[in-house]
Image (cartoon, rainbow, N blue to C red):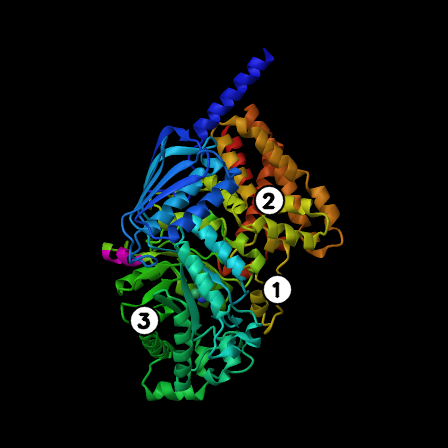
Amino acid sequence: MRFATLAFGVAVAALAGAAEAKPVLMPQPVSMTEQPGALTLTGPFRANVRGCPQPLTGRAVARLQADVDRLRGGPASGAGVRLSIHCRARDAGYLTLEAKEAYRLDVTAQGVAIDADGPEGMLRALATLRQLAAPASGAAGLPLVRIEDAPRFAWRGVMIDTARHFMSLPTLKRQIDAMERVKLDVLHLHLSDNEGFRVESKLYPKLTGSASGGQFYTQAQIRDLVAYAADRGVRIVPEFDVPAHTGAIVTAYPQVAAQVAPNDPFITQNRALNPASEATYRFLDALLGEMAGLFPDKNFHVGGDEVSDAAWAHDPSIQAFVTAHGLANRPAMEAYFHARVRAILAKHGKTVIGWEEIAATPIPTSVFVQAWRMSNTISATTAAGHPTVVSAGYYLDNLEPAAHHYAVDPLDPEADGFTAAEVTEAAKISPLAESAVRPLELKPLPPLTPEQARLILGGEGELWSELVSDEMLDARLWPRAAALAERFWSPASVRDPDALQRRLPIVQTELETLGLQDQASRARMVERLAPGHVQPVLTFLETVAPVRNAAHNHMIRAMLRGQAHPPPQDLNTLADIAPVDGTAVRSFEADVQRLVTGDVSIAPAIRARLTAWRDNAGPFARIARGHPDLEAALPISAEVTTLSGLGLDLVDSLTAKQPLPDAVRERAASALAQAKRETDASARPMFAFVHPQPPADLIVAIAPGIDRLFEAAQAAR
Ligand code: ACM
């Protein structure tokens, strides 16, 4: 009897599991139809390739096989699974904006068939197949599906800043691996800035010397990286930022520098080239020509952002040039400079892309523009006829959760910027705050016309690395870049944040299984903080997130207080290690969502998590003693304990369908209000610098999940 009951229970659980199991895909395809059943993976894929280039396709299949083996524990040694791959065209547009990326993927009981428009479509189909083969998509094997798919946008990028912190080659390759798995196709590398010039120049060897801390990629390494990315359907778009953000260049070659007033902390940290000197253009012709030869992509990024008036105002030779040429103002001088740079790059066969400032004056429509400061920009750049890449709303270094960026549609000119009320608020704070916020005030704008919309090439998540070291890169880029991959690939109608949150931890776990190093790096960083006692810190880190919007940037905060040269910031604090969109928090929220929509079977899992979090305060306090970095977080650890304990009360009330005791209601309201105040302190860019931040620059990331339980428990009254 007991056995029969047990067997019945297991069968019901298995059925429930089967009904639940849907392919977990990110990005979601355009269409997917499912049939009951599964194709068992009886052994390795036996590929039959027609019309696709080799060795590209063979290598792609080998990568797929290795990944499937890692996900499922292979290699399986049975008869194998038929994998027929057909490319309709070899595609001269491979690795360009015209690349043929559409594909159809059929999984039937007989095997897998891919019909791709071109080699990039083949790679994208294999990325889908990889996710279908993960146990989360179908424990019994590949789910039987027909998928028809094509990207919404051709430019689906991330930018990695290798200048502020150097990123090693293995680290970059790991990001490219993950990009391939979620169908991102542009890696924009920011390769020069005040802190360093990161590519070997045989013509100007001093660039990579002491001005760059000697950290750079050799030309052979760049060629290798470009080929590695090309194999995975990823274009590398290099950026050499001019005329500002050139501190490393002008330190190495002062003869091309604009003279600046001494003692201005901001300008001495963001030096510019001299746009009035022919020596500058001879230098750029040679240097950019050399760099253009290393990067085969048609697009070449010239930066162009953030030239301040002070950069050129104190150089008499530049002022004389401005007068002699009748240039009305600093933007006119910039326009002259960029026209010269464009002519240089045109000679080398490149199409220029630059940050939105380069389009402040009318320029040829052939120039690509990257909109970054606010969403209104896309209306202006597309009205002026520029192909536009959207980054406004996609600044990953703002440390916002994935859902924040996911909600921003690349075609929405009103998605990201400041409100009129915020401008008023900034004006009350200080003239400096107002001057930072007012230019970014969102104005109501009509939707883009179809002609304008066609000029939006896609989007790009930016990760500036002032506060991102090599070992932090995986954790700062993922899983949020996967959410952006979906925003840029999938139809605009795919925008349900709950569906995102359900899949994101699963996709992240797969990416980790396949090679992302965020967990290993986190464990190493914690070991440095608490040698031999990592577990209470790791448990604590499941529950928190770093403050947002550069509130954790102590260097900027010091400069705003007037300190000219703040020391570099230690990047091994809890705020640097805490995940932005932690898997534990997202899984917790997904579980809470199930509970509050009536699935009480999930309650034990929620209780187990909350109990572990609640009971962590004691062990955390014991190991924190004597470690100032950890001690700073004790108040936050206490908040986590309070909220987790209240969460348990709320689960009890929900599952027992009992009204919430008044005392619990009052304590929950108060604790949640405190967590919200602490989160709000860094909720908005710019304002985050003026508000005091919570202890250890940490916010309680489990609070929204607890709040959801609280809402449901109150509604159930
Ligand atoms: C930028 O964020 N300065 C382009």
Dot 3 crowding, Cα within 10 Å, few <14, some 14–19, many 20+: some
Q: Could you say which disc has been placed on residue 543 in the image?
A: 2
Instruction: Check disc 1 and report its element: helix, strand or loop.
Output: loop
Q: How many marks?
A: 3
Q: Could you say which disc has been placed on residue 427 in the image?
A: none
Question: x%, y% of residue 588?
Answer: 54, 38
How far apart are the two marked residues, 3 and 1, measured between alpha carbons? 41 Å
Relative to 439, is 579 above or below? above
The segment highlighted magenta reads 451-456
Q: Nearer the viewer, mark 2 or mark 3?
A: 3
Front-most of residues 399 and 476: 476
Q: Amino acid at mark 1?
A: Gln
Residue at image coords 39%, 86%: 278
How far apart are the two marked residues, 2 and 3, measured between alpha carbons? 51 Å
Please give the residue where the numbered disc 1 appears in the rendered image: 569
Please give the residue where the numbered disc 3 appears in the rendered image: 349
Residue that lies at the very extreme toward the top in this rendered image: 1
